Image (cartoon, grey):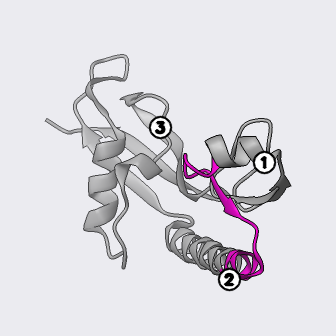
Amino acid sequence: MKLILRTAVEKLGESGEVVDVKDGYARNYLIPQGLAYAASEKNLLRLEVEQARAEEAAKHDYLEARRRASQLDGLSLTFQVKAGEEGKLFGSVTNADITDKLNQGELDFEIDRRQIVLDEPIKQIGAFEVPIRFHAQVEVLVEVRTERMDD
């Protein structure tokens, strides 16, 4: 029996693929679980329309991510922080702090803190390259500087 997979099924195929399976497997498991539907002519046309829509949406998301990344390209942020003699901060600069500072700027969009790829908070005086990921294929580096606050 030919079916169209709604979701990825391990050892069978990815979402949107047309697969050929035994009738019992289709009727007793895949269709009742909502994992697949019959590969009729009407459903194949529907699949093509859904795939075209998904492809268009993915292209739009990618272009929007590139546009947003271009606004941040070459940007530098400076944080005035309290620090000890060896340059170690009293506290840290986190992705939430970076998000707040970026969103106070003149961007025409909001940045979510989860887009900032910071393995661990910044705890030293210095300059750091912090990646911001807008899309799986679009990432931009922003310079984050920490400077000792004058008392």
Q: Residue at x 46, y 58 (%)?
A: 76
Q: Which residue is mark 2?
A: 49
Q: Say few, some or many: other residues with alpha carbon within 10 Å of mark 3 (under 14 / 14 to 19 / 20 or more).
A: some
Residue at (60, 79) in percent of width and height? 60
- Compared across the picture, whether 136 is left or right of 25 comes to left
**Which residue is at a point 31% across and 69% down the rendered structure image?**
105
Instruction: Residue under label 3, please give it.
Output: 118
Which is nearer the N-term, disc 2 or disc 3? 2
Residue type at tag 1: Asp
> What range is drawn magenta here?
30-49
Question: What is the spatial separation of the Cα atoms under label 3 and label 1, in whole angstroms?
Answer: 50 Å
Assign the N terminus to one quadrant of the image: bottom right
Tell me if 90 is positioned left or right of 117 in this view.
left
Question: Looking at the rendered structure, which numbered label has been put on residue 88?
Answer: none
Residue 47 forms part of the magenta stretch: yes
- Residue lying furthest left in this view? 151
For residue 75: magenta?
no
Residue position for label 1: 23
Q: In the depicted view, which residue is nearer to us: 22 or 140?
A: 22
Q: Earlier in the sequence, mark 3 or mark 1?
A: 1
Rendered-image quadrant of the C terminus: top left
Tell me the SS state at disc 2: helix
Measuring from the top left, give residue 86's x and y in whole percent: 37, 16
Q: Residues within 10 Å of mark 2 (few under 14, many from 20)?
A: few
Q: x, y (%) of residue 95?
A: 36, 42
